[in-house]
Image: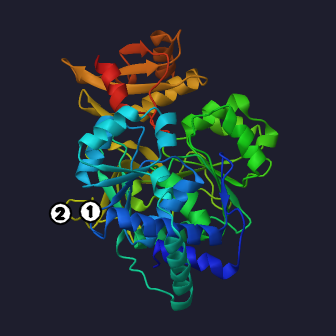
Amino acid sequence: MEHIYKSLLDTLNSGFKTKIIEDSLGNSISNLGLVYKSIVLGLILKQMIGNDESKPIGLIMPNSVPTIIVFFAIQFLNRSIAVINFTSGIKNILSSIKNTDIKFIITSRKFINKANMQHEIERINKSHCNIIYLEDVRKSLSLRIKISSFLTFLSLIINKKKFSSDKLAVILYTSGTESEPKGVGLSHKNLFANRMQVLKTLKVNKSDKFFTCLPFFHSFGLGIGTLLPILSGCKVFLYPTPLHFQTIPKILEESKASVFFSTDTFLKKYLPYVSKSTFSNIRYLIAGAEKVDETTYEKYESFNIKIFEGYGVTEASPAISVNTYENHKIGSVGKIMPGIDYKIEKIEGYDKGGLLYIKGENVINRYFGMSEKFDWYNTGDVVYIDKEDYLFILGRLKRFAKIAGEMISLGLVESFPKKLWPENNSIVCSIKDQQKGESLLLITDKIDANLKNLADFIKKSGLSNLYIPKKIKIVKELPILGSGKIDYRKIQDIAED
């Protein structure tokens, strides 16, 4: 098990490599440059933040080369870095800062101004958290720092300094779609273990280039989309957001990337702007975070590209399973990776599958700041595994409604409007019902959606009336989190309004 910074130093054993990281702003850096600049920045930051290793350092930055330098500078200092989801709203941001006791946050004025986050920064300042701007840090660069950095670099290379892999490396946050975000403290050991599990499962090689537009506060964006390629000797192209639907297909092609991570929601949004040439270099198009619809598979297959659906949770660092060229079954999320133990507990009212629990070197055993430990992590997902060991996600435990004593999967009901109106987005919610306890409500962006047509379609499948939504609400657009997931808290607010 290796410390992240030790893994970065080890990339130098393969020699000098130019442009291991590029970004959409025109920045690039070599592996040698990343090591040296992280030391320089680390020594400057140490003067500003002190030596209290128990306090995590916050980060509010987009996917870019400077952000990577900051990340590894904190790892060089052997401090943990808390990556704040700056798209989650000021309430969740302040909750994250308070719950993980963050006293310093690193960002840049240029980014804050571009993202129009001046109000959020004011609120953060009032919470007694200090803001460190990279523009100010650069002014502290002196000849003494440069000399000290060079000597430190030589010392690290020659003396092979040991780093503890048991310490926390990164703190990420649960999405907050169902409750307040919890801090997920991932150790160097957790992240290293998951990196090895992925490399054993996918045939990634050093000639691969990753295109990463899932944000760093997204566990796949950081762990698999960024750290895995950098620390495995692959190149990576960073883009600040997955929301530029017209631009991303063009840059994906221009970057000549071979590995691309996305979600079903985003893949649908890219469709009007893709062509066969978009994926001319892609070897792996991996989708996670939500179920991939059959129509999405079919439309991408028309461009000669296969989607490999995978599954993970932040608490597992994050990858748990993925389809591969050798083991692929549409509708599943592949087979569970080596080194991850699992068990499925039956749930009353569910005929098929049960609640998934996992454990392994990549899985946390408690949330940050909480004393309660767990041997097995409860994913909260209802799943089943077929005879060939393929994992199928039936839905979140919280995404089932109990109607007239029967457990109804909201995900199953959603599959019908998605088939009936494949060009649109639809979500099913459960709301209180005086007669049956709960009833179903459909929220869709199809302007002329007709509830009777949907009811007839569901009846033809042989399902009972319990599976038919009783009400419908039409919205212009469904709320989406920056990670690509549906914002279920806002969806529920719309349903109950």
**Residue 65 location (% of width, % of height):** 59, 55
Residue nearest the observer in this picture, 239 or 353: 239
Quarter of the image with the C terminus is: top left
At mark 2, the secondary structure is: loop
**Residue 27 location (% of width, % of height):** 66, 53
Residue lying furthest front: 143
Residue nearest the observer in this picture, 485 or 354: 485
Q: Is residue 116 left or right of residue 178?
A: right
Find the distance from the CA under tag 1 to the CA under tag 2: 7 Å
Residue 399 to residue 377: above or below: above
- Answer few, some or many: residues within 10 Å of disc 1's Cα (few below 14, many 20 plus, some between 14 and 19): some
Image quadrant where residue 104 sits: bottom left
Q: Which residue is mark 2?
A: 371
**Residue 266 location (% of width, % of height):** 58, 36
Residue 188 to residue 134: above or below: below
Question: Of the numbered discs in the image, which one, if any, rests on residue 366?
Answer: 1
Q: Closer to the N terminus: mark 1 or mark 2?
A: 1
Q: Could you tell me which residue is drawn at 54 percent across and 72 percent down?
A: 146
The answer to whether the residue labelled 1 contacts the one labelled 2, judged by CB atoms less than 8 Å apart, is yes
- Answer few, some or many: residues within 10 Å of disc 2's Cα (few below 14, many 20 plus, some between 14 and 19): few
Q: Could you tell me which residue is drawn at 36 percent across and 32 percent down?
A: 119
At mark 1, the secondary structure is: loop
- Asked if one can make out residue 342 in the rendered structure from this viewpoint, the answer is no
**Residue 302 location (% of width, % of height):** 76, 37
What type is the residue that disc 2 sits on? Ser
Residue 471 to residue 139: above or below: above
Q: Is residue 428 left or right of residue 221?
A: left
What type is the residue that disc 1 sits on? Arg
